[in-house]
Image (cartoon, rainbow, N blue to C red):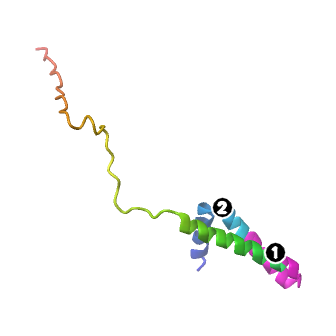
């Protein structure tokens, strides 16, 4: 478990650093507010964590799915593909004997 948690946190902070910070701040505020019987801080913390979690889920739904098939790159224009290409020849070097 000790090795899994740092990997999870690193990947979460790399993907969405702002959302991850807001979730962390909200969770800490809720924890402190719950421990000290400060219900306003608890509510602000839960609200912050909830809004950031909802934003993260909304952004995950907005992302386009990754295509499994690679897109073929074309280097020639479609107009020039109808004509034949010239044959390239490499000049041979004369040997000096």
- Counting labels gives 2
Name the residue located 10 percent from the left edge and 14 percent from the top edge. 97
Residue farthest top in this picture:
96
Identify the residue under disc 2.
17
Is 40 contained in the magenta span? yes
Q: Is residue 16 left or right of residue 50?
A: left
Identify the residue under disc 1.
44
- Residue 7 on image: x %, y %: 57, 69
Q: Main secondary structure of the magenta part?
A: helix
Range shown magenta: 24-41
Pick the residue in front: 23 or 76: 76
- Residue 74 on image: x %, y %: 31, 43
Name the residue located 55 percent from the left edge and 65 percent from the top edge. 62
Classify 10 Å Cα crowding around label 1: few (below 14), some (14-19), many (20 and above). Answer: some
Pick the residue in front: 90 or 67: 67
Q: Is residue 45 above or below residue 13?
A: below
Q: CA distance from mark 2 to mark 1?
A: 20 Å
The picture quadrant where one finds residue 24 is bottom right
Confirm whether residue 3 shows in the render.
no
* Image quarter hosting the N terminus: bottom right
Q: Is residue 88 left or right of residue 38?
A: left
Q: Is residue 73 left or right of residue 85?
A: right
- Residue 32 on image: x %, y %: 83, 78
Name the residue located 43 percent from the left edge and 62 percent from the top edge. 66
Query: Dot 2 lies on which element?
Result: helix
Query: Mark 2 vs mark 1: which is more N-terminal?
Result: 2
Classify 10 Å Cα crowding around label 2: few (below 14), some (14-19), many (20 and above). Answer: few
Is 10 contained in the magenta span? no
Pick the residue in front: 67 or 77: 77
């Amino acid at each position: 478990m000790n090795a899994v948690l740092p990997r999870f946190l690193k990947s979460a902070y790399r993907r969405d650093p702002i959302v991850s910070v807001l979730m962390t701040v909200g969770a800490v505020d809720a924890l402190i507010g719950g421990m000290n019987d400060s219900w306003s801080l608890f509510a602000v913390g839960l609200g912050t964590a909830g809004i950031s979690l909802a934003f993260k889920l909304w952004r995950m739904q907005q992302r386009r799915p990754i295509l499994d098939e690679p897109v073929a790159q074309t280097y020639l224009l479609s107009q020039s593909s109808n004509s034949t290409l010239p044959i390239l020849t490499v000049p041979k070097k004369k040997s000096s004997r």
